[in-house]
Image: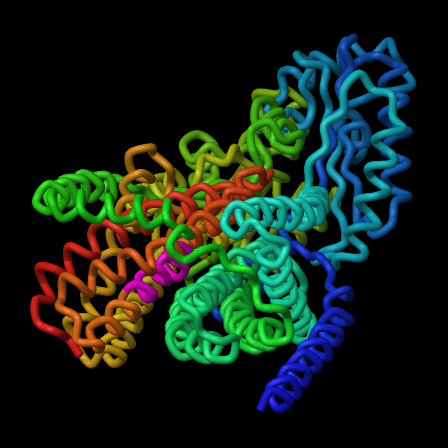
Amino acid sequence: MSDKYKKYSYLALLFIVIITLFSGSQAIKLRFDYDFEKFFPQEDDDLDFFTSYRKTFENDNDFVLFALKNNAGVFDQDFLNKAQEFTNHLNTLPHVREVISPLEAKYPKFDFSSIGDFQVPYFHIKEPAKYSADSLFISQSNDPISNVVSIENGVLVIVLKNKELINKDDSDELSTAINSLVDSSDFDEIYVIGKILGQQLYIDIMKVEFGTFMAISILILIIFLIIAYRSLWGIVIPMTTVLLSVVVSLGIMQLFGRPLNMMTTLLPVIMLVVGMSDVVHLVAKYLEEIRIGKSKVDAIRYTLKSVGMATLLTSITTSLGFITLIFVNMEPVQDFGIFTAVGVMSAFGIAIIFIPAILYLAKTPKIADPTKSNADWDKWLRKCFVLLIRNKKSVFIGYIIIGFIALIGAFQIQFDYFLMQELGDDDPLVKEIKFFEANFDGIRPFEMAVVAKKEGATVFDFEVMNEINKMEEFLIDDYEVGQMISPTTPFKFVNRGLRNGKPEFYTFPLKEMRYNYIAEKMKESGVSNKLVDIISEDGKMARLSGRMVDPGSRQILVRNDSLENFYQKYIDTTVIDYKLTGTPVIIDKSSRYLALNVLSGLAVAFILIAVMMSLLFKSIKMGLISLIPNFFPILLIAGIIGYFGIDLNITTSIVFTVAFGIAVDDTIHFLSRYAQELKKGRSNLYAIKRTFLSTGKAIVITSIILLGGFCSLIFSDFMSTFYIGVFVSLTLLFAVITDMMLLPLVLIFWNKQKPC
C-alpha cells in the first residue's frame, strides 16, 4: 500500500513540475501594456459615433504639449531662437504628423492699397525692433494665439501631433525621443504632457510595482508562517505551493495572449494570499490529525475529506466574485476578473494535488505534546467564546447601530472620475498637468459634433454658422472650454484682417451680408481650403474642438445639463443638432457604467453564493445565514467611503467585488466545520463552540495572511491599487471579526434546529 501511495505522490509531483515548467516558459514572455482606449466600453453607440467622428476629422488625444518658459520673457531673441530650434527638432522625431508652433503662426491681413492680402507672422524672430509691437498685439489678442502664448508668465506652448492611434512600439519610440530632446534642452523651465508619455509612465510604474508587490507579499507571508508554524517545514511547503500557483496563473495569461495591465499586475499578489489561505487550512487540519495520533496516510485522507470540500467551495466562491466582473463592458476589467478567477481555481488544483503528495513523501513533522500545543490559542479562543455568549444582546445591538451608521454613510457616496486620477498629487506628471491647467486651460480634450439639420443645408449656410457661433460662445463662457477652434474661427480671422488687424474685430459677423462678403474673401485668399479639419467633406458636420481643465465627471454632467438647457432655449433646434464626443466623454460614460455594472455583479455574486450554500447544506436558511457576516463588512466599507467623501469610480467599485469574493471564504470554512459537528450529533451550541475553537485559529491566521498580502498594495503609486489595498484589507479585517462574533450568534438564534 505504501508503494502505491509513493508512486501516486511521485506522479503527482511530476505532473506539477511539467505544468510549472511549461507555464514558466510562457510567463517569461508576458509583456506590460497600458492603452487608455482599452478602458473604452465595447459595442457602445457613443464609441461607434466617436470612431466615425475621428475618421472624419482626427483623434482628439494624439498630441503632446510643450510649454517653454523663459524667465526674461517670451520676447527674448536667444529664447526665441532656441524655441525655433526646438521646434525644428520636434519635426524630425519619428511618428510625428505635425508640429504647431506659435513662432510659425501667421494671421491674414488685407491691404486695400494693393491687390490681395498677405500673412503676417505673430513673431518677427529676426527683427527685434518689432518685438514690442508683436508683444502688444499678442497680449491684446483674443484669437487662438492667446491660448498658446503667455506674455505675462514668459511661456509659449508648442503642440506636437503624433501619428493617430499610435501603437505601443511606435509610442515608446517617440516617447523616448521626446524625453531625450527635453533632457538635452536648456530652457529655464519646460513642461511636457501627452497621452503617449502618460502611457509610458504607467508601464514603467507597473514594471516596478509588479516585482515590488511580489517581494513584499512573499516577505510578509514568510513572517506570518514563521510565527504560525515555527519550522522550516511550515514555511517551505506553503510558500512553494503558492509560488507554483502564481507561475501557472501567469502562464495561462500568456497562453491567451493577454498582457499585464494596471489591473492584472495585481494577480500575483492575489494568488499568493488567496492560495495561502487554501494551504493554511489544509496544513492546519493535517497537523491537527497528526497531533491526535493518526498515521500520515489517515491524516492526509481525513484532511482531504473534511477540509478539501470546504477549500473547493471557497475557491469557487472567490472565483464567482471575480468572474462577475465580466459584466463590466471593459476589456482590462474583464481580463482581470476572468484570469483571477481561473488563477484561483488553478491555485486550488495545485494545492489539492501538490500538498498531499509532498506531505506523504516528507517526514512526519514533529508535534509537541498535544496537551501543551496550541494551549495559548485554545485558552484565548475559549475566553473569547465565553465572553461572546455572555454579551449576545450587546453584540447584536452594537452591530445594528454600526450597520445603521454605515448605511447613512453609504447613501452619501457619489460617483466622480478624473482623468489621470490614478496618479497622486506629488507625481511629476500630475504637476505638469496642474501647470497647464493653471496657465493654458488644461489638457482635457473637448469635442463636439454639430450637424446641419435642414434638408440640403450645410455648415456653410449663414443660419447654421450663426447658431454654431452661439453654441461656441456658451461653451467658452459657461462650459469653460479653452483653446476653442470651430468653423467660425476663420471668419473671425478674416473679419479682423479686413479691419486693419484690430483685435476688437476678431468676431463672427452677425449680419448675413457681411458674412457672405467675408466668405467670398475667404475663397479668394484660399482660407476656405483650410476648413477641411473642422468641416466634413459633405459640409453637413462641423467640429468644435478645444481643451479644458478637468472638473471631474460629476461636474461635467452638470455642465452637460446646462448645455442642453441652453440649446433648447436659445438655439434654433430646427437648424442644428449637436453631440458631445471624444475620449473623455467615452471614459466618463464607461466609468459610470462600470460602477453600476460592478455593483450589479456583486448582487449576482451574493445570489449565486446563497444558492450554492443552500444546496450544499440543503437549507435555504443556511444559504441566507452565509450572507449575513459578509454583508456587514461590505456595508461598513461603503459607509467609510461615503463619510470620507471618497468618490465611487472604477477603483472603489471593484473593491466591493474583490473583497466579497475573498472575505466569504472564512464563512464557508466556519459553516462547513459547523455542519460536520452537527452530523456527529452535537447540540447546536456545542457544535458552534467546537467550530469556534477548532476552526478559529485557521480563520484568524488566514485572515492575517490575507491582510498582510493586501496591505502591500498601499505602497503603490497608482491610487486604484492603493485603494484596493486599503479597502480590501479593511473588509477582510471586518469580515474575520464578524465571522468570529456575529456568525456564531446568528447560528445560535436563527438555527436552533439542526439544518442537516
Which quadrant of the figure has residue 689? Answer: bottom left
Q: Quadrant of the C terminus?
A: bottom left
User: Can you say whether 287 is above or below 207 in the image?
Assistant: below
Q: Position of residue 338 (x, y in %)?
A: 51, 70
Which quadrant of the figure has residue 308? Answer: bottom left
Query: Is residue 593 visible in the rendered structure shown here?
Result: no
Q: Position of residue 313 (x, y in %)?
A: 38, 73
Query: Is residue 459 visible in the rendered structure shown here?
Result: yes
**The stretch drawn in magenta includes residue 112:** no
Would you say 396 lies left or right of 98 here? Answer: left
Would you say 6 lies left or right of 109 here? Answer: left
Q: Quadrant of the N terminus?
A: bottom right
Would you say 210 lies left or right of 611 here? Answer: right
Q: Residue at x 55, y 32 (%)?
A: 482
Start and end of the magenta stretch?
Answer: 656-670
User: Can you say whether 391 is above or below 101 in the image?
Assistant: below
Q: Nearer the viewer, residue 369 or 144?
A: 369
Q: Residue at x 32, y 44 (%)?
A: 637
Total residue callouts: 0
Q: Position of residue 141 (x, y in %)?
A: 63, 21
Q: Nearer the viewer, residue 557 or 301?
A: 301
Q: Residue at x 42, y 71 (%)?
A: 311
User: Can you say whether 732 is above or below 53 in the image?
Assistant: above
Q: Residue at x 37, y 54 (%)?
A: 371
Q: Nearer the viewer, residue 370 or 306?
A: 370
**The stretch drawn in magenta includes residue 668:** yes
User: Can you say whether 179 is above or below 350 in the image?
Assistant: above
Examine the residues drawn in magenta and state their main secondary structure.
helix
Q: Nearer the viewer, residue 215 or 446?
A: 215
Image coloring type: rainbow
Would you say 643 lies left or right of 530 here? Answer: left
Q: Position of residue 351 (x, y in %)?
A: 55, 71
